[in-house]
Amino acid sequence: MAKVKGEIVVNTERCKGCELCVPVCKEKTIAMSGLLNSKGYHYATSANEDCNGCTNCAIVCPDGAITVYRVKLEAA
Amino acid sequence: MSQLLTREEICVPENEVYHRTCLLTDAALTYCPGCGHGTAHRLIMEVIEEMGLQADTIGVAPVGCSVLAYDFMDIDMQQAAHGRAPAVATGIKRLYPDKFVFTYQGDGDLAAIGTGETLHACNRGENITIFFVNNGIYGMTGGQMAPTTLPGMKTATSPFGRDTESMGYPLKITELIAMLPGTYYVTRQSVHTPQNVRKAKKAIEKAIQYQKLNRGLNFVEIVSNCNSGWKMTPLESNKWMEENMFPYYPLGDIKVPKQN
Ligand SMILES: Cc1ncc(C[n+]2csc(CCOP(=O)(O)OP(=O)(O)O)c2C)c(N)n1
Ligand code: SF4
Ligand code: SF4
Ligand code: SF4
Ligand SMILES: [Mg+2]
């Protein structure tokens, strides 16, 4: 069975730390960074390897801060 | 082995499945964190990009938090006086009937000061599209009561909650304009969850496609949050919206074109 592997890239300067992306991720990939961006927001960050590239986080982000990538993995 | 792909190997353009539409400018949105205006802007611009309409679209921005929409949407835009966007859009569409013309308005703009313009543009059956972001409050000016404010809802000008006996009832303007023969497609959506975002995007697509038919006005309400005005966190405000706004403003199509 072909599996998929996803990755997200957060534009940390665009992120406003609203946390709307956190609960929509079924893989619990997103966590809020302890660091601040230049506007003073704790930004979203990818905190595990389980992203499946579903795009849920990106499409609820009001600031369009998330880019999503996805690859199909061949069955081992 | 492919299982060992690194992050750098995955994050390359050919694997990209979602990126912010190029029809949003690089300007940082001036909205509060978590405000649905940003998502609504993005969906409209995504659809215009996907339909290849960038050069054929003219948008009309309102007065309200989205007054600067022309700075964010990379298309031809005009800003209208408070509530007058449907009248301005009427003029633009009549001069340029081949353009896709839309307004983007809040509830204070569309359902308070601009009620007359809204009703008459709808009743005349102008071939424009209206995107109506209803957050039940005057967000921009500091959270005053709007005609759409819910019964009992606390705002800066109804600190003890909206008392319907002295302050009247929330105006369901979307149901009202759906009754007018001049409207063609009327729907109510939200943009706070992935499922709702996908549904709202389909509704926006229809509201744009139908304009080409010249059968009347297409209207998309987006029930949204105003976490600053409601004095909640973004996640709390979306939950409050589900529990309180949706029962009064139920989501779904209100008027769909007759099949023929
Ligand atoms: C003629 C006029 N009257 C009043 C105002 C003040 N004013 C600015 S925005 C606004 C209300 C906006 O509320 P809404 O349309 O719901 O937009 P939101 O900010 O909630 O998105 C008001 C009353 C104004 N700018 N011009
Ligand atoms: S793309 Fe899906 S799985 Fe990956 S981080 Fe976003 S919500 Fe989670
Ligand atoms: S939804 Fe967007 S702005 Fe909000 S925390 Fe997530 S990435 Fe940041
Ligand atoms: S005041 Fe309300 S409507 Fe305006 S940007 Fe902030 S959350 Fe959005
Ligand atoms: Mg409002």
Image (cartoon, coloured by chain):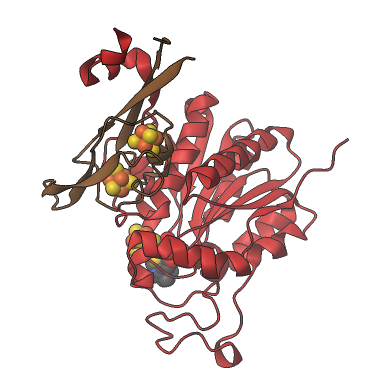
Chain colours: A brown, B red
Instruction: Examine the rendering and report whether any part of residue B195 can be seen.
Output: yes
Q: In this view, does A73 lie above or below B73?
A: above
Determine the residue positioned at 41% across, 77% down. Answer: B144
Tell me the quadrant of the picture where the C terminus of chain B can be found.
top right
Q: Where is residue B98 in the image (x, y as percent from the top left)?
A: 62, 30
Horizontally, is B10 left or right of B56 in the view? left
The residue depicted at 45 percent of the width and 56 percent of the height is B62
Q: Position of residue A26 (x, y in %)?
A: 41, 41
Query: From this viewpoint, which residue is outermost toward the bottom?
Result: B166
Residue B121 lies, with reference to residue B9, above or below; the image says below
Which quadrant, please, contains the N terminus of chain B?
top left
- Left or right: where A10 falls relative to B219: left
Relative to B77, residue B149 above or below:
below
Is residue B24 something one can see in this rendering? no
Residue drawn 31% across the image and 14% down it: B3
Q: Which residue lies furthest to the top in this view?
A: B1
Q: How many marks?
A: 0
Residue drawn at (54%, 39%) of the image: B198
Image x and y of residue A42, in percent: 18, 50
Q: In which quarter of the image is residue B123?
A: bottom right
- In-front residue for pair B118/B43: B43
Task: Return the residue nearer the eye: B205 or A45.
Answer: A45
